[in-house]
Amino acid sequence: MKYRRVVVSRHGGPEVLQVIEEDIPEPKAGEVRVKVLAAGVSAYDLMFRRSGRLPGTPRVPFTPGEDVVGIVEELGAGVTAFQPGQMVAGGTFSLGVGGGYAEYVSMAAGEWVPVPSELDPVRAVCLVVNYVTAHVMLHRAAQVREGDRILVHGAAGGVGSALLDLGRQVGLEMFGTASKHNHHLVSAFGATPIDYRADDFVACVRQLTGDGVDAVFDPIGGARQLWRSYRALRRGGRLVWFGVAATRSHGLRIIPSTLLMRALLKILPDGRKVPSTPNAGKHVSETLAELIAQLASGKIDPVVAARIPLAEAARAHELLERGGVAGKIVLTAND
Ligand SMILES: NC(=O)c1ccc[n+]([C@@H]2O[C@H](COP(=O)([O-])OP(=O)(O)OC[C@H]3O[C@@H](n4cnc5c(N)ncnc54)[C@H](OP(=O)(O)O)[C@@H]3O)[C@@H](O)[C@H]2O)c1
């Protein structure tokens, strides 16, 4: 039997994404083959597609996609923990090359987490990377406590909106930078929006809080951006840097200066801290089950920006690349 998957055939614009057909691989011993219903699109997929120079980029041709939800179809030898027909979610980090933009994905049984059948797979897939990352940054890196004040950059984005959703649960006072047209989403999570394009976010935070915030979550990067995020902290505050979304506008050249700035900020003896960035991929299985339970009980509310058929992955990349998207773009398969 044949199945379809999307491949990055060479580095370049969204047009390099191609749909290919090949035989469905049999799951190996210990693996579970899943019929994919929803696959997340992330900023990393775009970075890996554009250029091979980013550390960790798989060799072309490769299938992007770090997060999937689907139905268990076939069990490899020795797998007893799952039943065919059961819904599951998983991150493809163990495969090393993405792999989510496909009609079928096979991975070791331990990489899959059960999802209650009544949940919407498109909303559930938002948890695998975005919410796990947000959870890890809030609780492991920044170690926030009830009543803390936080500033979230890219607050309307996939990870940013997840930070606000989880931060609301902990009872944090929240501020979020976003483009003006996304401010309604930031406000809907109970945060105060800041228009980073028109206003100086450091001045806004000082004006709104007096002495600054307890934690800043910065997935934007760039030396100037990190320095300004640091200045928005009050004494004892933590700057959690976890991404380089600014490469979209400034290219990969911002990465070395970002790393240098972070190293400098780490050694400044002024009572503010820059914790090391945890590897969110290592915490998926332990954190995902807890987040799925929260989705099932209505405690969290992932924002889906668009549902786009798998074969139109190039359109999904164009949409994310253009910017202004609120929430997560999800590819749907096997509809
Ligand atoms: N370390 C990890 O484990 C990990 C995991 C996942 C993601 N990440 C990182 O997180 C970043 C964001 O991922 P995502 O999937 O949430 O991306 P996304 O959905 O594309 O969101 C990115 C957001 O950044 C905003 N933005 C762009 N430039 C900005 C600036 N100068 N100041 C403030 N906001 C700005 C955009 O906001 P507007 O549209 O409102 O302008 C957009 O909402 C990625 O670049 C990736 O590097 C890291």
Image (cartoon, rainbow, N blue to C red):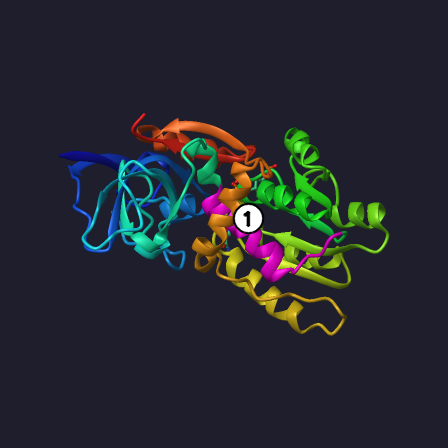
Residue at (52, 37) in percent of width and height: 296
Q: Is residue 65 left or right of residue 33?
A: right
Identify the image quadrant of residue 38: top left
Q: Is residue 66 visible?
A: no
- Vertical placement of residue 101 versus 263, above or below: above
Q: Is 132 part of what is drawn in magenta? A: yes
Q: Position of residue 27 (x, y in %)?
A: 20, 48
Identify the image quadrant of residue 216: bottom right
Q: Nearer the viewer, residue 116 or 163?
A: 116
Q: Quadrant of the C terminus?
A: top left
Look at the image and give the residue range highlighted in magenta.
127-146
Query: Which residue in the structure is indicated by mark 1?
Result: 246
Residue at (44, 31) in percent of width and height: 118
Q: Nearer the viewer, residue 38 or 4?
A: 38
Q: Is residue 171 visible?
A: yes
- Vertical placement of residue 218 versus 40, above or below: below
Q: Position of residue 256 (x, y in %)?
A: 52, 63
Q: Is residue 291 left or right of residue 174?
A: left
Q: Main secondary structure of the magenta part?
A: helix
